[in-house]
Image: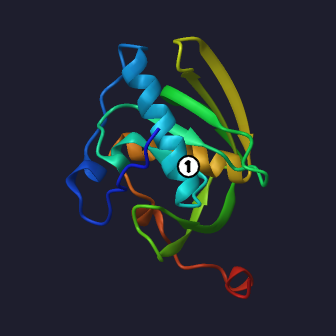
Amino acid sequence: MAIRKIQTGSAPCLYKKAKPVTAFDGKLHSLLDDMAETMYDADGVGLAAPQVGILRRVIVIDCTEDRNGLIEAVNPEIIETSGEQGGYEGCLSFPDEQGYVIRPNVAVMRAFDRNGNEFEIRGEGLLARAMLHECDHLDGKVYKRLVIPAPEEDKAE
């Protein structure tokens, strides 16, 4: 495993659509391992392959406090959303920045694991936010395009 360089700011790979993964092999496994190590090292809750310069549809997420809930998703797609949540969001590709973003409060994601087995996961709150944020990266979208002024009640937090 290795810590990879996180691409930041205006790096072109952050604004390009990632390609689907077709081979569930050792190369993919190494990428997933490196992405998890990179995410944990940077103290993030999610990371998408384009953030480490790889234009493939791969994400890792861990929103748990004990950092023991790693989700690896290959070719993920959001298949259902509901509700609404607003909150401050940041991104490892835009260090020391954050903005207020409104997203669905619940999201259901369909994806494949590292071995090509399909699964679905339902996320609520922070997990839904992370799934949506990381899937946006796979389409070349960054959270900063969604930022709006925070409501007064949220500015005091």
Q: Which residue is mark 1?
A: 46
Q: Nearer the viewer, residue 106 or 4?
A: 4
Vertical arrangement, residue 154 with respect to residue 45, above or below: below
Q: Residue at x 40, y 61 (%)?
A: 93
Horizontally, residue 82 falls left or right of residue 140, namely right
Vertical arrangement, residue 128 with respect to residue 74, above or below: below
Can you give x and y, in whole percent of width and height, for residue 131 in the image?
A: 58, 43
Vertical arrangement, residue 29 with respect to residue 88, above or below: above
Using a 10 Å C-alpha cutoff, classify the residue at mark 1 as few (fewer than 14 neighbours), some (14 to 19) or many (20 or more): many
The residue type indicated by label 1 comes to: Gly
Say what secondary structure mark 1 lies in: strand
Quadrant of the rendered structure where residue 50 is?
top left
Q: Residue at x 48, y 69 (%)?
A: 147
Q: Nearer the viewer, residue 48 or 146?
A: 48
Can you give x and y, in whole percent of width and height, for residue 26 in the image?
A: 41, 18
Q: Residue at x 54, y 79 (%)?
A: 149
Can you give x and y, in whole percent of width and height, for residue 157 in the image?
A: 74, 83
User: Does the image show residue 133?
Assistant: no
Horizontally, residue 29 falls left or right of residue 131, namely left
